[in-house]
Amino acid sequence: MSESGASWATNLFAVTIFAEDLEAMVEFYNRVFGLPQVFAGDTSAIYKFGETMINIIKIEGAPELIDPAPVAGPESGARSMFTVNVDDVDALYAELVAKGVEFLNGPIDRPWGPRTVAFADPAGHMWEIAQH
């Protein structure tokens, strides 16, 4: 909180994720999410999810952004999950299965309320689709 008592964290502008194979990620994100690219380059691609941008960067560019922290590879396991809220999980699940998406789980009715399904992108980033 700031001195005024209001949080400074009111808008998540961008999330940066790292990928070993940018071309595979671009193909996957184009096919699965159907969003226009805000930027496409040799080392990165950006997609806009509502008001938040997902910035995909080739793993070779990661040290420039996070050094001295180490860059973890996909073999390290899941470290985060992005959740997208939708009106009908089952309908979107069927649509994405038809597009070749392999799901980790679901559709599942979670004890805390939502119905969810989860999948990973080619770099191992977890995505959850939720219906509240």
Image (cartoon, rainbow, N blue to C red):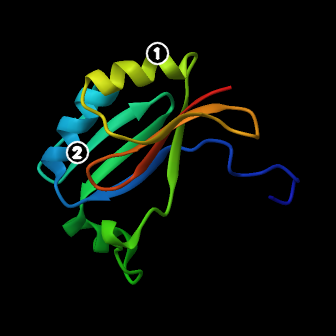
Work out whether mark 1 precedes mark 2 in sequence or the reverse, and give the earlier one: 2
The amino acid at mark 2 is Met
Q: Which of the pair 47/11 is nearer the observer?
A: 47
Q: Quadrant of the rendered structure where residue 131 is? A: top right
| Tags 1 and 2 touching, CB below 8 Å | no
Q: Residue at x 43, y 50 (%)?
A: 126
Query: Do we see residue 128 in this rendering?
Result: yes
Q: Residue at x 16, y 55 (%)?
A: 21
Is 43 situated left or right of 73 in this image?
A: left
Provide residue 25's location: percent of width, then percent of height.
Answer: 22, 45
Is 18 situated left or right of 43 in this image?
A: right
* Label placed on residue 91: 1
Query: Do we see residue 35 in this rendering?
Result: no
Q: Residue at x 35, y 68 (%)?
A: 65
The amino acid at mark 1 is Ala
How packed mark 2 is, by other alpha carbons closer than 10 Å (few <14, some 14-19, many 20 or more), is: many
How packed mark 1 is, by other alpha carbons closer than 10 Å (few <14, some 14-19, many 20 or more), is: few
Dot 2 falls on a residue whose secondary structure is helix
Q: Quadrant of the rendered structure where residue 110 is? A: top right
Dot 1 falls on a residue whose secondary structure is helix
Q: Is residue 78 above or below residue 22?
A: below
Quadrant of image for the N terminus: bottom right
In this rendering, the label closer to the viewer, 1 or 2: 1
Provide residue 41's location: percent of width, then percent of height.
Answer: 15, 45
- The residue at which mark 2 appears reads as 25
